[in-house]
Amino acid sequence: MQTLIFLVLWGIELLLAVWGLRIAQFFSYRMPKVAARPVPDWSPQVAVILPIKGVESGTGANLEAILNQAYRNYRVIATVESLDDPVCDAIREFQEKLPSGKLALVVAGRATERGQKVQNALRAVAATTEQDEVLAFVDGDANLGPQCLQALVGPLGYGPHIGATTGYRFYIPVNSHPANAIVSISNAIVASLFGPYRRTVAWGGSMAIRRADFYGYGVDAAWNHALSDDFTLSWCVRKKNGVKIHFVPQCLVASTADYSFSRLFEFMTRQFRITRISSWHLWASATAGSALYLLTLFSAFYFAVIGLYLHQWGGAMGSLAVLVVLYVLSILRGLMLLRGGRRLLPNHAAELDRVRWWYALGFPLVQAWILLTLIVAGVGRRMTWRGIRYRMVSPLETEVLAPRE
């Protein structure tokens, strides 16, 4: 009976591994072709909402990329918690070089009943007008390509069945530190699940919605006590029958990965905890998938060793075959994810090559790290984000527990 259970589990995992390889193949081969298509030319007035905090190594370049989009009619509203934030100096420097109204600065104040990022975004939205037909939200750590805004906004012109559009990030490691490799591969796994023909959620680093729909779908009210901007917006859009969130591969943006193990653990645990509270089934599916992968890998290794020790050659060879096939599928999947990232972000191909051996051979270790953080995220509702302690009561209710450090 025990053997039968493991055979069934192994069979399920091998099917899932083949499915994961197929998804990675789509990401590697099909998605770059989709990204190469001409972007829709619909170009209404856009207000780009930029919640931002602090100055990092790439902040200046990211701001410059946002302000130099190949889009005819847009303005940027940068929004900060306080004028004491050092990023305000960088914003003022850009304001001096730009035409009046191109870049505005909004002070949101300290959040007391919602996430600070949501607070900043809400204050910026309040500064828009009906002339701003579309709201585009971007993160300060996202490096946008010059066509990203047009690609993000254009599909909204297809009709009311497109409720929102979204891009996603791809982590570019600053060096070959294992933490940077882990976050890059983990994120690439998620990125490969996005697609124009799949059930997609929005990502707050690059997403767009018609201003009328932002209010019509009740995003403003839902954000009032929320911690997560993107999960909440996704929920508001997807509860409308016949309305979808459209993924835009041209807005797969490069984000810098510069992590230590402790910072990576905090980041991934927070992300997975938000996921669990916002979408329990998504968290449970990810946890079960990682657990089944590792269980199959190590149980096959165990039975292969035991079989060889007891001279049970048939069982040993069968277990060894499962082990080898699963690992080979993992190698192929990792290489395809790397290839997809290199093709979609060719300017960062050399940087991605710093961790190519992790993509090729490190899949089991990455899955072990993912499972660890998923399990830790399965307990509790408290988290620290940008120095602020929160308790996420529900997707639409947040308690701010402590001020900034």
Image (cartoon, helix red, strand yellow):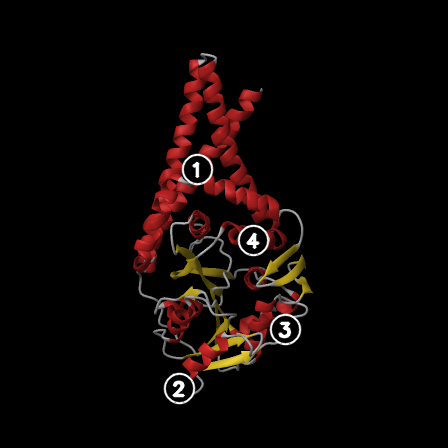
The answer to whether 393 appears left or right of 10 in the picture is: right
Asked whether the beta carbons under mark 3 and mark 4 sit within 8 Å of each other, the answer is no
Q: Residue at the far top: name it.
A: 311
Q: Residue at x 33, y 56 (%)?
A: 344
Marks 2, 1: nearer the viewer: 2
Front residue of 63 and 1: 63
In the rendered image, residue 337, in percent from the top left (x then y), is placed at: 37, 47
Residue underneath mark 4? 266
Q: So how many labels did they put on this image?
A: 4
Q: Amino acid at mark 4?
A: Glu
Q: Residue at x 48, y 12 (%)?
A: 310
Q: Earlier in the sequence, mark 1 or mark 4?
A: 1
Snapshot quadrant of residue 123: bottom right
The answer to whether 361 appears left or right of 231 in the picture is: left
**Mark carried by residue 110:** 3
Identify the secondary structure beneath mark 3. Answer: loop
Asked whether the beta carbons under mark 1 and mark 4 sit within 8 Å of each other, the answer is no
Identify the secondary structure beneath mark 2. Answer: loop
Marks 1, 4: nearer the viewer: 4
Marks 1, 3: nearer the viewer: 3
Residue underneath mark 1? 17
Q: Earlier in the sequence, mark 2 or mark 3?
A: 2
Indicate whether 20 appears above or below 400.
Answer: above
Snapshot quadrant of residue 241: bottom right
Q: Earlier in the sequence, mark 2 or mark 4?
A: 2
Residue underneath mark 2? 99
Tell me the crowding category of disc 4: few under 14, some 14 to 19, or many 20 or more residues within 10 angstroms, Cα based: some
Asked if one can make out residue 98 in the rendered structure from this viewpoint, the answer is no
Q: Earlier in the sequence, mark 2 or mark 1?
A: 1
Q: Earlier in the sequence, mark 1 or mark 3?
A: 1
